[in-house]
Image (cartoon, rainbow, N blue to C red):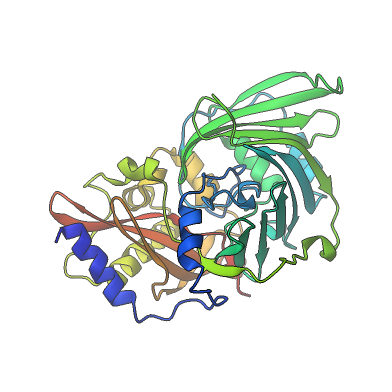
Amino acid sequence: MSDRKDMKRMVETYLGSLETPAGDRVDEKVLPAALTAMHKAKPPMALASHSIWRTIMTSKAGKLTAAAAVAVVVLFAVVDSFTNPVWAIEQAIEAVKEYRAIHITGTIPGRTFESWMRANKSMTQSQDVVARDSNGGIAWVKNGSTYLYDPGPNTVFFENAITQGFSQWLGPEFLETFAKAQGAQVLQGKDPATGRDRVTLLCSLVDVDGPQSWTVVFDVASKLPVSYTCWHNLDRSGEPVCDSTRITYYKDLPDSLFDVHIPGDPAYVEKPLAIAEENIDLLSNPDDGLPTAGLTPQEAAEKIVRTTYQAVIDGDLATLRKLSPLCRNWDDEMLRSILLRTGKSDRIAQIVQIGPAGKTGESSLGALIVMPSVLRRGDNTKIEEKMIVQFRMIEDKSSCVVYGPYGISRVLE
């Protein structure tokens, strides 16, 4: 048996007896068909958003309406090209401060969608999300979990993490991030449909879901983002994975908009853990990560996650880049400002608890483990974050690296 398979078996053996998060019962009769349908699904799209780690990710939830739900946050990204925009984006930052909710409509390959979202009270991330597409698919977030209904196999795929929505919220923090980014291009012109002045921001990056590029259009009069387009490549070529034709901001939205009722009696199937294969090369440097020889998977995952968070707390950028390869191409200013949150009240200030290990999966590089952590921020808020650890066997040596967060952080108190 290969070393990678040995590692996978060791992970599964060690974690097999651990208690996993509770979820809806799975109908065993339809499970094989449901999993087959999901694995055949096309990757979805999502507009980039920013987390406490202030980077960007899209959720691979298959051809479900999750494709329409705007992006999830994840830990580390590699910026392709940004420059300081010449447009006074500070005006847009002020304009979005008074809005807590948004409605997005647009198209994805083969269908249309609409999505409603509402921020939490602190306006840092999405609290309520529901998205529907023209094929009957529905995605929603409830009680810290994400649900994706596919009417074809009459199945709800779920994750015990918030993997849909904005974090940071599509508000001041999101726009401040773009203002600090290097290499973005800004175009000024007029909307051909309305004749109104508009500004278009062009961006590209490689994140935890592979290469992405997009445009974000701002209305000059209202100062608000009004549309976006996203591609799964760096040069905005070919058919976009999402073309959001309209973004409307609201002061708030009624609770009834986020009620979801699924027809019939669908099966509930937990979505497998996976990472973007396009990023495997970035995780394969033998000089990165921590050695795992002599450690159980739990011990190795806990050690690297604890060391990574301590590097964030200490501002140790060299260690951070070594343990988390996908952030290696961020410059020091971006890491301190966007990821470490230097000088801000929501910075990570204390590690309260790491583990025990939870969900597992596998990439072509080796086994994956989700490691939950309880952290305390500078404002004394306690949060839970779930981090994906990638195990690997390179040059006959076993080691692991931190891939990125699994979903959005959850406020505990």
Which of these two is toward me, 374 or 56? Answer: 56
Asked where in the image residue 108 lies, by quadrant, the reply is top right
Would you identify the image quadrant in which residue 224 lies? Answer: top right
Give coordinates of residue 287: x percent, y percent: 22, 47
Residue depicted at x 43% and y 60%: 273
Q: Quadrant of the N terminus?
A: bottom left
Where residue 154 sits, quadrant-wise, is bottom right
Residue 214 spot, x, y in % from top left: 60, 32
Q: Position of residue 162 (x, y in %)?
A: 59, 62
| Vertical side of 176 occupied by 217: above or below | above
How many numbered dots are placed on residues in this image?
0
Q: Is residue 378 visible?
A: no
Query: Who's the residue at 25% across and 44% down the image?
Result: 285
Q: Is residue 9 rendered to the left or right of residue 143?
A: left
Tell me if residue 265 comes above or below residue 177 in the rendering.
below
Residue 76 in view? yes
Q: In the rendered view, does 302 fall on the left or right side of 179?
A: left
Residue at the spot x=84%, y=56% of the render?
A: 252
Q: Position of residue 232 (x, y in %)?
A: 51, 35
Is residue 15 placed above or below 126 in the rendered structure?
below
Q: Which quadrant does the C terminus fall into?
A: bottom right
Residue at image location 59% in from the left, 48% down from the top? 50
Question: Which of the pair 313/174 is nearer the observer?
Answer: 174
